[in-house]
Amino acid sequence: MTGNQKLFSDLSKPRSRHEIVTANGHVLTASAIGTIKPFSEVLCAPKLTANLLSVGQLVEQNFLVIFSPNGCVIQNILTGETMARGRKASGQKCWEDAMHEELVALEENDTWDMVDRPTNATIIESRWVYSIKIKADGSLDRYKARLVAQGYKQEYGIDYDETFAPVAKMTTVRILLALASIKGWKLHQLDVKNAFLHGNLQEVVYMNPPPGYKYIKLNQVGRLKKSLYGLKQAPRSWFGKFRTTILGAGFTQSSSDYSLFLRRTTSGITILLLYVDDMIITGNEAEYRSMSAACSEIIWLRRLLSKLGIEMKGSTTLYGDNTSAIRIATNPVHHENTKYIDVDCHYIRELVEDRSISLKYISSKDQLADLFTKAMSRSRHNYLLSKLMFCDTQH
């Protein structure tokens, strides 16, 4: 995107409205779209004072974007020709704040120790990678700066040994999704923030202080204690830390897919699938978590109504279609197989005992909440809509 119309070989009005949030937070509207060889479909926004490029689109068109502390270089992968150079982001407050936030997080994570520069060791460099996070509605969320190690300078056998880390097979993902749909299990998707930074390094790795880092003495480098994005062994270090933690929580690792972890008890099964730093969790034990969350919402609503002068007489009924979850949540006897969810069970039991909540079973076919949480046939969808007294105003 650019505001310089002279760069275009052709221009036309865009078919749809394009609004862009710039680095300083301003929202600009593109007035035209055209070609700036060798790039096609370039947006023109007259008030834009800089040239903005989409890294994703460049990569799709066989261009390589190389970032450095001072900016970036765009090269044609096929010919090696340098197409353009970008200016550095430092000096702009939004990016300075983002870099400061990243450095604070790395320090709190105890990522490195500053030591005197060794004489006979590989010292790798680091670089900043910048991105703008956008909300679902297209508005600006935040500016993100990530410190990345230049791991291509690492030497095998010296700076790292193994790099392989299991990744979930897509067949396993499909089977898990199908199983959850058939069994009526709830799916939970989690994204681990800065996942690779949690991995503990086994090798000795030295890195020059990141650009802009001020808390160093002369001739010092950082000895990394935790993994960084860009290191050869980063994925393996993260997976090792995750595996140790999840096995300690009572899970077992599948021999069919090493990214699949299971925990079986007499009350059911919990399944966890890891894909790099994304997790899918399902199984009938997840019902307790959902029930606990629903109870918290009910109690909040009861207190709100009380503040508004509306006293609630009697208990509020919470319907569930999992008999195992209801039985364990209301059973005052401690079960060893529920020790990892006992906090949720204890909370629900207290609410049942003081008659704030009453739990009742409802058949799965009459569970209205499924309308918002599960895929279903058109006939079942319409059936649940009728139970909620929804109607189509167009007919």
Image (cartoon, grey):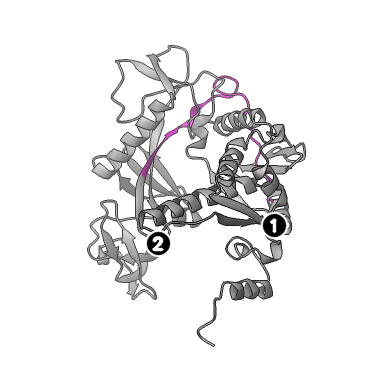
Assign a secondary structure to mark 1. loop
> Which residue does the image show at 73% across and 55% down from the upper left?
183
Q: Position of residue 140 (x, y in %)?
A: 34, 55
Is 385 on the left-hand or right-hand side of 35?
Answer: right
Q: Judge by depth and name the residue closer to the eye, 295 or 59.
A: 295
| Three-letter amino acid code of the residue under disc 1 | Gly
Q: Position of residue 248 (x, y in %)?
A: 65, 27
Q: Position of residue 94 (x, y in %)?
A: 27, 44
> Which quarter of the figure has residue 67?
top left
Assign a secondary structure to mark 2. loop
Range of residues picked out in magenta = 144-170
Q: Which numbered tag is attached to residue 184?
A: 1
Is 266 on the left-hand or right-hand side of 13?
Answer: right
**Mark 2 burial class by Cα count in 10 Å: few <14, some 14-19, many 20+:** few
Decide whether the magenta segment is chiefly helix, strand or loop.
Answer: loop
Q: Is residue 236 above or below residue 143?
A: above
| Res. 152 in view | no
> Which residue does the image show at 67% across and 67% down from the upper left?
376
Q: Position of residue 217 (x, y in %)?
A: 30, 16
> Which quarter of the figure has residue 1?
bottom left
Q: Nearer the viewer, mark 2 or mark 1?
A: 1
User: Which residue, given by chain and number where applicable, does mark 2 sit on?
Assistant: 137
| Three-letter amino acid code of the residue under disc 2 | Asp
The CA distance from mark 2 to mark 1 is 30 Å
**Number of marks in the image?**
2
Q: Earlier in the sequence, mark 2 or mark 1?
A: 2
